[in-house]
Amino acid sequence: MALFVAALAIWFLIRVVDVLLLLFLAVLLAVYLSSLTDYLERRLRMRRWVGLMIACAGTFIIVAGLAALIFPPVVDQTQALVSGLPQTLTNVQNVMADWAQRYPFLRRTELADPQSGLVAKLINDATGYLSSSLVPYLRAGGKLFIEGVSVLVMALYLARAPALYRDGVVSLVAPRRRAVAVGVLDDAGATLRAWLTGQILAMFVLGSLTALGLLVLGVPYWLAFGAFTGLVAVVPFFGTIVSTLLPALFVVGTGDWVKVVAVIGLGVLVHVAEANLVAPLIMERKVSLPPVLTIASVLVMGSLLGVIGLIVAVPVLAVTMVFLRHIVQGEIYGDTSHLEPAVLKVSGQFRVPKTKSSG
C-alpha cells in the first residue's frame, strides 16, 4: 500500500510539474515585491497595500525606463549581428582553417577544411537547444499570456499577505514540529531574497563591465554582447563560458589573435571580479552552494524543463539545501551547528553546540 501511495504521489508530481514551476516563479517574484514592501512599510510607516502598489509601480517605471534607454540600440546591434552572421562565420572558419593547417596533427581534421562548416555546426547545435526549449512557449501565445498573468497575480497575493500563506503551510505540519517549519520557511525566504538581490546586481555589473570593456577593445556589437552577458548570468558556469567565448569567436574572424586573447581575458576578469567581490558581498553565506552540485542542478533542471529549468536551477537548489540543513541535519541527525542562532531561536532549538570535554 505504501509503495502504491508513493508511486501515485510521484505520478501526480510529474503531471503537475509545470504548475509547480509557475508557483515557484510566483514565489520568486513575491519575495522580491515583499522585500520592497517590507522596507517601505517599515521605513515610511505606510499601509502594506500602499507599499506594494509603490513597489510594483516603481519596478515598472525602472524597467520601462531602462528598456526605453537600452532596448533600441541593443535591437539595432543584434539585427546587424544576425544579418552579418553568415559572413562572420565564413571569416572565422577561414581563419581557423589557416591556423589548423600549420600543425600536422590538425591538417586531417575538419578544422583545417574551410568548407567543412564546423563553426556553423557548433553555433547551430548551441542554438538548436535553445530553440527547442523556447519555441513551444513562443508558439503557445495564449497559454504563455495566461501563465504569465497567473504568475503575476499569485505573486501579488503572496506579497500582499505573506504571513497568511506561511501560517497555512505551517498549519499542515504536526503541532510539535511547527516551530521547525517556521524556521525552515524563514531561512528559505532569506535565502531567496539573498539570491535575488545578488543575481540582479550581478547581472547589472556583468553586463555593464562587459559592454564597457568590449567598447574599449573596439569589438563590434559591444552593447548586444553586454546585454547578452547580463541575461545569461542567471545560469552559473555555463552562462559564463558562453558569454566569454561568444564575443571572442566573432573577433577570431579578424585574425587578430591578440584581441581574441584580450576579449577572453576581459570576460575572465569581469566574471572573477563579480564572483569574488559582488556575490560574497550581497549573498553572504546564504547561497553558498557547492560548485559540483550547482553544475549538476543546472544540467538536471535544463534536461527536465529546458531554458526555464536553467533559470530556476540555482534557487531550487538553494531551497533544497535549506530543507536538507533543517530536516536531515537538524532534525534527523540532531546537528544544529550549521544553523544561524536566530533560526535556532525561532525553531526552539537554541542551544550551545557541545564540545569535547577536557576530562
Image (spheres, rainbow, N blue to C red):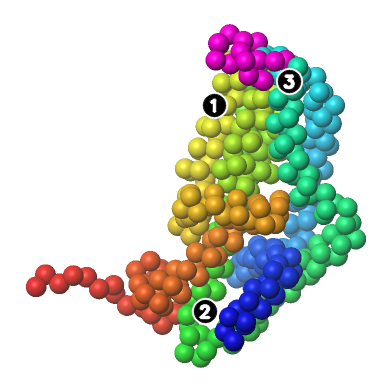
From this viewpoint, which residue is outermost toward the bottom?
Answer: 175
Specify the label residue 116 is tagged with: 3
**What segment carries the magenta color?**
98-114
Is disc 1 in contact with disc 2, using a CB cutoff of under 8 Å?
Answer: no
The residue lying toward the viewer, choosing from 122 and 203, is: 122
Q: Earlier in the sequence, mark 1 or mark 3?
A: 3
Q: Residue at x 67, y 28 (%)?
A: 247
**What residue is at 58 percent from the left and 46 percent from the top?**
236
Distance from disc 1 to disc 3, alpha carbons, whole Å, reads 29 Å
User: What label does residue 265 carry, if any?
Assistant: 1
Tell me the kind of residue under disc 3. Ser
Tell me if 290 is positioned left or right of 115 in this view: left
How far across and how far down the image is residue 262, in percent?
A: 57, 21
Dot 2 amino acid type = Val
Instruction: Return the x and y of residue 42 as percentages of the image width and height.
Output: 60, 70
Mark identifier at residue 122: none
Please say whether residue 104 is one of the residues in the magenta stretch: yes
Residue placed under numbered mark 2 in the picture: 182
